[in-house]
Amino acid sequence: MTESNLLPSGKARIDSLEMRGITKRFPGVLANDHVDFDVKSGEVHALLGENGAGKSTLMKILYGLYHPDEGQILLNGKPVSISSPNDSINLGIGMIHQHFMLVPTLTVAENVALGLPSSRGALTDLDRVSKRILELAKIYGLKIDPAAYVWQLSVGQQQRVEIIKALYRGAALLILDEPTAVLTPQEVDELFIIMRQMTRDGHGLIFISHKLHEVVEISARITVLRDGRKIGTRPTSETTKQDLANWMVGREVGFAPERGHSDLGAARLQLDGIHCKNDRGAQGLRGVSLEVRSGEILGIAGVSGNGQRELAESITGLRKITSGRVRLEGQEITNVTPGEITERMMSYIPEERMKDGMIKEFTVAENLILREHHKSPFSRNGFLNLRGIASHSDRLIQEFRVKTPSRETLVKNLSGGNIQKVALARELSRKPRVIIAAQPTRGLDIGATEYVREQLLAERRKGTAVMLISEDLDEILALSDRIAVIYEGQVMDIVPRETATPQKLGLLMAGVHPE
Amino acid sequence: MISELFTTTVLIGILASGIRLATPYLYAAIGETFSQKSGVLNLGVEGQMLLGCFAAFYVALTTENLWLGLLAAMIVGAVMGLAMAFVTVNLHAQQGISGIGFYLFGLGMSDLLFQKLLGTVETVKGFPEIYIPGLSDIPGIGEIFFSQNILVYGAFLLVPIAWFVLNKTTLGLKIRSVGENPDAADSLGVSVARVRYFTIILGGTLSGLAGASLSIALLNVFQQNMTSGLGFIAVALVYFGAWKPAGVLAGALLFSMVNSLQLWIQVLGIPVPSDIAVMMPYVLTILVLVATVSKVRTPSALTKPFERED
């Protein structure tokens, strides 16, 4: 073996890896339908597709977590059999999972050592592991403290631990499953630097994402999957974002939603010096004053954890306001119950749709009437009116284009986008006066995102007052009439859309006044 | 009358029997620590102990060999653990409910076997005291710590061993990660099922041993339901000890000392109603749990069955 065949970690390169005709069936779903995919040493090959397109399934097959029904995998031209993560690790394949596979209560070194044979037999050899981690960290330019506990690390640092973990196991080829989904823009830049370094050194990388600009920035080739089938593979230099988006969705998609005209009306929601505590008992909001008028979308921009959740929850009656007041169309609703707020026609699309927005073990129909189940036509004298519920849900399923086998399907069996459509259907169909939408498109694919944004804009045109809390700056800029930037529980500034730029908002989000 | 408690002889007596009485708590609670660390709440400890009690006693009585009795108790506990592991790991049963099932099984089965095989309360000659040369002659200390039987020494030795295994071995690392994030362990090729089988069977074995320590080392009899809630207290001790062997030790000593105190109160005939005295350890369980449980972090995957997502 010549020197150039080795990676800096000392392991052999994987010159090529090829998946041929991979087919995987789940009960009722064809997750992968004769998919071909390959990756070479020294390149980033992006795997692009909407949620449910079969990207994760394909990669879980490659990593040995699933077994394909048909097809074969060739490593450097030779067929290999991968039946467990152990097999793929031994072949030099590593995977960075979307949800980190780390044990928060253990140290970095312990996480890396887990599952590996120790040089001291039954005893752990954490000193030796730590030394090797530092070596690898130096080679690949990753800053890491082997003795730190994982729970102490930022998300970006945790991702580095995942990368080190894979490198430590001799990964020559790395699968990165939506690695940017949880990162801040700066952390994404840092990740891309690491990825470029790794490809220069001869690693092959598979990059899964549905963020087009990232895919175009980092990859050499792009493969698009849709509904379990491969649509095509192209060199990145020969594609445009628009082509890719159309490929993914299977039709023309617009990037900038049509805002249309809207008449600004009276203030519907007014906040006056709101203070509240966060979950740890510290000050969550420190005197927030805002108003949202009829026919406008007020965007709330900010880095995650600066009081967004506290803001949504204190307005909707889920969190106690310690001082200040909230008025809905002039009437005080400070610290009234969520039930009363519902009665006043405020709708809420919570950030954690599976936890706060839906009862996932309930059917679509049941979830659709959660907010108004005690009223006609859904119930009478305490008895549920099944016929009323059925016709209501069938109408909403159609109107909001919810893809579900039936109204009796459990919500947990729907895709993220469809779950959000159920939430939207429930919240919007009651003709709310005010809507609080918290991260309404987080984790959704292009098609569903587009749909949700259109619905919010439609509400705005109808004269509803919409508060849009989002960490996605593009979304904020595309939808909002005015943008309030929240930082450490305070409103830094409120910027009209005409003068808002990403640079200006970015500074405010970091707590800096541009003046 | 109360002043009788504070004579040196009585105090030494209370402490010595307190140390002795910690034995069953320690075996059971250390075993339970292992299974909870791996994410499995085994509420069947009491049942495993009762069957262990009976097996040890019966085998020791019929073969006149205490060591065979001990082995029998451990095997019975291990088999109970195996069954529990199958039900929780393979069948994904609700751990709280299946644990209660195993408790009731152990309670009923030990009673049935007692009626069929023994019929009356008999006694065996239990494990004798071992006087550690030199140390057992120290006044007071010697009587309290160094004049106990082998199972008492074993129980206290188990504490540092458990700490070492959990924190210094690859096995311990696997156990801790399986109890915190089984998905992560699985993705690194650690078999979650195997680790949990191991800890549950180990827990069962130690519960059997805990039972044996009652019937052939401490009390040297077998009676129906003779553990009377001790196994449940052991489960509580794991919470009290914040899943740390040293914490479990502290908890076990606290309870056994209170128990010892109430026994001595009865022995000395101090006019405290015996019902109240007997209640003391149980009341203490509730108070201590209320005071401590909210402050400590449980293993994240505790009571959650593991299944690969699809």
Image: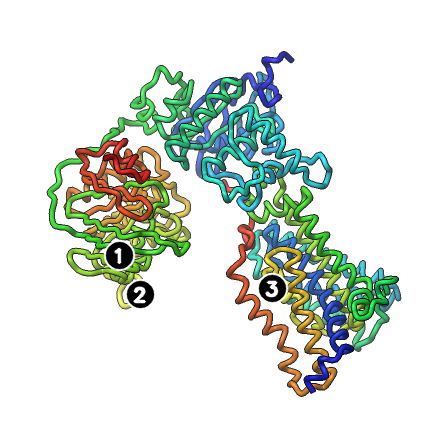
Gap in angstroms between the C-alphas marked 2 and 3: 43 Å
Q: For mark 1, what is the residue?
A: A388
Q: Of helix, strand and loop, which one carries label 2? A: strand
Residue A105 shows up from this direction: yes
Chain of the residue under the numbered disc 1 shown in the image: A
Crowding at label 1, few (<14), some or many (≥20) Cα neighbours within 10 Å?
Answer: few
Position of A319 with respect to B98 (left or right) is: left
Per the rendering, the mark at residue B51 is none
Judging by the rendered image, the residue that carries numbered circle 3 is B236
Above/below status of A472 relative to B53? above
Question: Which amino acid type is marked by label 1?
Answer: Gly
Q: Identify which residue, B68 or A196, lies in the foreground.
A: A196
Mark 1 vs 2, N-terminal side: 2
What is the three-letter code of the residue carrying label 3? Ala
Tell me, yes or no, whether dots 1 and 2 are on the same chain.
yes
Q: How is the image coloured?
A: rainbow
Judge from the rendering whether residue A91 lies leftward or rightward of residue A459; answer left or right: right
Comparing labels 2 and 3, the label whose residue is closer to the camera:
3
Question: In this rendering, is residue A125 above or below B126?
Answer: above
Instruction: Tell me what residue is drawn at x 60 percent, y 72 percent.
Output: B284
SS at badge 3 = helix
Chain to which the residue tagged by mark 2 belongs: A
Image quadrant where one finds the N terminus of chain B: bottom right
Q: Is residue B120 above or below residue B247?
A: below
Cα–Cα gap, marks 3 and 1: 50 Å
Number of residues whose C-alpha sits closer than 10 Å to that of mark 3, classed few (under 14), some (14–19) or many (20 or more): many
Instruction: Work out whether residue A377 can be spotted.
Output: no
Answer left or right for B284 relative to A238: right
Q: Amino acid at mark 2?
A: Phe
User: Distance from label 1 to label 2 (Cα)?
Assistant: 12 Å
- How many other residues sit within 10 Å of disc 2, few (<14), some (14-19) or many (≥20)? few
Residue at the spot of label 2? A383
